[in-house]
Image (cartoon, rainbow, N blue to C red):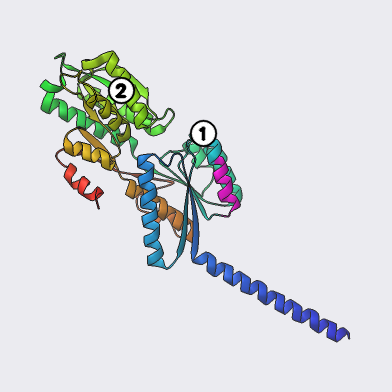
């Protein structure tokens, strides 16, 4: 009887082990052929962020076909709320996502997000809104993808300087040999907004063109807020405004709407943006927008995906194009009437 009982126990152990082994192999095989990426966006209706999202979807579908792998890519909209974004991160962690990509609502919340992800051992890729370096160094599985904000500001300055040199007689309406300007800034506390504002003005000044700031204010990257700000400035300063400098294209297009809705200008002020969204390229092509600076959403999306994929599959992240330590910062391209047709054609593909 003891032998019989021993046989039953031995058989049960063997059977149980085989089940566990089989489940382990099945899980391993499933894990090998699947990846779950959760993406939380500060605002899904932001034109540039929406472009990155679309490119991410395209890239993931292409990768699925190439590698015969299932990629679950889920986007959630924080609607500008830190609380919403925190809850979304918690949900991704609870549902055992492999990678979490974060377009921060609030840079100061990065440390909390990183600590949560670290405890769950889920790698993070921040994009477009850069955490401070100290936060990125809290864990070795945290990366950032964005653009070179200083370069975009300098290219924006170049567009204004070139226009001054070509059409000074029209641009300098009051013939005082300086530029009267207004500045539409992005969200307060956003590092790109601060850098774009500072270095555009600094480079124009360093070139030797005297500037007079009539007004500046935040329009939080939003077109409707830019319209309201511009309407106020037109009422206050009218034809004194010679240049409108905008931290992004969406606000620049809002400013254009205000300018085109009034007849107070003897000569319309020039407007310059940053991002290279399709609507801005079309405005440049029509001559309404003097210029923009392309921030390559497709290249950023590729870097976000490549880092995510490499982290999940145990590949060397250092092989990702453009990576430098924990950062990928993409190059910009200056666009004016002279070269816009090239980039407009690409945006229509």
Quadrant containing the N terminus is bottom right
Judged from this view, the residue extending furthest toward the right is 1
Q: Which residue is mark 1?
A: 108
- Mark 2 nearby-residue class (10 Å; few <14, some 14–19, many ≥20): many
From this view, report whether residue 204 is shown above or below residue 116. above
Magenta segment boundaries in residue numbering: 86-96
- Mark 1 nearby-residue class (10 Å; few <14, some 14–19, many ≥20): some
Question: Which of the pair 50/336 is nearer the observer?
Answer: 50
Name the element at disc 1: helix
* Left or right, residue 108 beside residue 202: right
Q: Which mark is residue 230?
A: 2
Residue visible at 41% across and 53% down in the picture: 305
Look at the image and say whether residue 230 sits in the magenta stretch: no
Is residue 185 visible in the rendered structure shown here? no
Is residue 11 visible in the rendered structure shown here? yes
* Left or right, residue 107 beside residue 281: right
Q: Position of residue 254 (x, y in %)?
A: 30, 30
Q: Position of residue 218 (x, y in %)?
A: 38, 25
Are circles 1 and 2 on residues that touch, CB within 8 Å?
A: no
* Left or right, residue 191 beside residue 248: right
Residue visible at 33% across and 21% down in the picture: 216
Q: CA distance from mark 1 to mark 2?
A: 30 Å
Dominant secondary-structure state across the stretch colored magenta = helix
Q: Quadrant of residue 12?
A: bottom right
Residue visible at 16% across and 16% down in the picture: 177
Which tag, 1 or 2, sits closer to the chain's start? 1
Name the element at disc 2: helix
Q: Position of residue 269 (x, y in %)?
A: 20, 23
User: Which mark is in front, 1 or 2?
Assistant: 2
Residue visible at 40% across and 55% down in the picture: 306
């Amino acid at each position: 009887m003891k032998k019989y009982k021993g046989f039953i126990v031995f058989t049960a152990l063997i059977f149980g082990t085989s089940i566990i082994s089989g489940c382990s192999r099945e899980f391993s095989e499933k894990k090998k052929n699947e990846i779950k990426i959760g993406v939380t966006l500060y605002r899904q209706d932001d034109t540039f962020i929406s472009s990155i999202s679309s490119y991410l979807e395209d890239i993931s579908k292409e990768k699925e076909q190439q590698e015969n792998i299932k990629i679950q890519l889920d986007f959630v909209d924080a609607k500008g709320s830190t609380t919403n974004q925190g809850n979304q991160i918690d949900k991704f962690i609870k549902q055992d996502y492999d990678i979490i990509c974060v377009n921060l609502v609030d840079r100061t919340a990065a440390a909390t997000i990183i600590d949560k992800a670290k405890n769950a051992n889920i790698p993070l890729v921040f994009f477009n809104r850069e955490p401070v370096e100290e936060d990125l160094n809290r864990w070795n599985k945290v990366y950032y993808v964005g653009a070179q904000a200083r370069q975009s500001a300098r290219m924006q300055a170049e567009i204004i300087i070139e226009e001054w040199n070509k059409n000074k007689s029209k641009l300098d309406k009051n013939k005082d040999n300086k530029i009267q300007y207004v500045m539409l800034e992005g969200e307060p506390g956003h590092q790109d907004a601060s850098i774009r504002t500072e270095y555009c003005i600094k480079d124009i000044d360093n070139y030797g063109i005297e500037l007079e700031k009539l007004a500046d204010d935040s329009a939080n990257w939003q077109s409707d807020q830019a319209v309201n700000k511009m309407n106020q400035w037109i009422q206050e300063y009218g034809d004194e405004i010679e240049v409108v400098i905008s931290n992004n294209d969406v606000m620049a297009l809002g400013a254009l709407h205000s300018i085109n809705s009034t007849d107070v200008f003897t000569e319309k002020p020039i407007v310059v943006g940053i991002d290279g969204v399709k609507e801005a390229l079309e405005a440049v092509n029509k001559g309404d927008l003097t210029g923009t600076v392309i921030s390559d959403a497709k290249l950023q999306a590729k870097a976000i995906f490549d880092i995510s994929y490499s982290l999940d599959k145990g590949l060397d992240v250092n092989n990702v194009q453009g990576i430098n330590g924990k950062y990928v910062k993409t190059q910009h391209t200056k666009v004016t009437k002279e070269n816009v047709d090239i980039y407009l054609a690409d945006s229509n593909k």
